[in-house]
DNA sequence: GCACGAACTGCAAACTATTTGCAGGGCGGG
DNA sequence: CCCGCCCTGCAAATAGTTTGCAGTTCGTGC
């Protein structure tokens, strides 16, 4: 972790934009909220609430506030929640540059996460939906394996 | 739920077979263990530990024992653990008739689960693995939507 | 600017799912 | 028949997440 994430400014919406979106929902862009966004913007892969909270070290911000902020941001669609099957929620900032819908390749040893930008399930999903009479179908897909360093 | 599951005997390994497998791991097919298997065999879709425990009503069996039994059975590969993203583990009996690896289509309103027997990701998975230098790659895929009754 | 109400915050406690320590009980092999 | 390992119930410990409450802050309307 920690390599090559200095210049992701162009990928995310800027603060003013986020504030606007918050305001539309009668939400406020408060200090702690900014810190959470800051952390998410800085670290462009799924993070646990605890990790986010740790990254805020220095600034006083309660873990409960992190959870509440993440919920608000998720409701507004600015943040996405992921689930890697270990019972811990992970959150990622929805950015303009990347497709909102994407999947991950996770190393089962070191937990490194590779972002996969393409999704190839649209047609299959459509087929499954009609075959079973379901509507508004979505899916969750994550890959797990050993990364090059952990083999 | 509760329709058309009377004749699934042919799909599952029988008790003696299971006992054999347990014995190979120096494990015992005890009363509570049988009850858990019974419940899993009876209800052929992912169940939470709590549901399984509730289905055992009458027979005294601690919830902790259900968890322990499920863990043992999962370690032996007789049971599979699934994760629908709500932070609750669900377990399903691995049967002979069905491919061990399969996915689900879950109604987000009534939680009905449709079993999908085919998996179409082998080639895509291989491509992703080699493209990223990962090995021993697996995946988790679940579909979510509204079932016919809930639309 | 200033006042006001809705949102937000920290803190502590509550909840939920899951795991674990411990003492007792039972099955299978020798 | 005895011994040891496995298994069990019970209760307590964990871990992640949510919530109640009282005080604080934000952003708007004046």
Image (spheres, coloured by chain):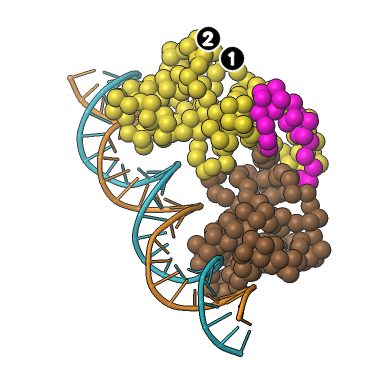
Chain colours: A brown, B yellow, C cyan, D orange
- For the question of whether residue A11 can be seen, the reply is yes
Callouts 2 and 1 in the same chain: yes
Neighbor class of circle 1 (other Cα within 10 Å; few <14, some 14-19, many 20+) is few
The disc placed on residue B10 is 2
Residue B78, x across and y down, in percent: 51, 24
Q: Quadrant of residue A126?
A: top right
Task: Relative to D16, say whether B12 is above or below.
Answer: above
Residue A122 highlighted magenta (yes or no): yes
Please give the name of the residue rendered at 50% of the width and 37% of the height, measured from the top-left corner: B89
Neighbor class of circle 2 (other Cα within 10 Å; few <14, some 14-19, many 20+) is few
Q: Which image quadrant: the C terminus of chain B? A: top right
Residue B62 highlighted magenta (yes or no): no
Residue B16, x across and y down, in percent: 43, 12
SS under mark 2: helix
Label whose residue precedes the other's in the sequence (2 or 1): 2
Please give the name of the residue rendered at 61% of the width and 29% of the height, measured from the top-left corner: B147
Q: Is residue B145 left or right of residue D16?
A: right
Write down the region rendered in magenta.
A116-138
Residue B36, x across and y down, in percent: 40, 25
Please give the name of the residue rendered at 30% of the width and 24% of the height, measured from the top-left corner: B59
- For the question of whether residue A92 can be seen, the reply is no
The answer to whether marks 2 and 1 mark residues whose Cβ atoms lie closer than 8 Å is: yes
Q: For mark 1, what is the residue? A: B97
Please give the name of the residue rendered at 36% of the width and 37% of the height, measured from the top-left corner: B64
Q: Quadrant of residue D28?
A: bottom right
Q: Tell me the chain of label 2.
A: B
Task: Relative to B53, say whether A39 is above or below.
Answer: below
Q: How many marks?
A: 2
Task: Relative to A100, say whether B95 is above or below.
Answer: above
């Amino acid at each position: 972790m920690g390599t090559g994430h200095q210049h992701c400014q162009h990928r995310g919406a800027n603060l003013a934009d986020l504030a606007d979106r918050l305001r539309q929902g009668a939400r406020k862009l408060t200090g702690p909220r900014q810190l959470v966004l800051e952390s998410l913007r800085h670290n462009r892969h799924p993070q646990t609430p605890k990790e986010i909270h740790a990254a805020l070290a220095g600034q006083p911000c309660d873990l409960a506030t992190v959870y509440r902020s993440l919920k608000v941001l998720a409701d507004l669609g600015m943040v996405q929640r992921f689930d890697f099957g270990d019972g811990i929620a992970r959150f990622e900032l929805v950015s303009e540059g990347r497709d909102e819908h994407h999947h991950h390749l996770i190393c089962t040893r070191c937990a490194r996460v590779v972002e996969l930008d393409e999704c190839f399930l649209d047609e299959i999903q459509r087929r499954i939906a009609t075959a079973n009479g379901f509507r508004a179908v979505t899916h969750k897909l994550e890959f797990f394996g050993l990364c090059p360093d952990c083999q």
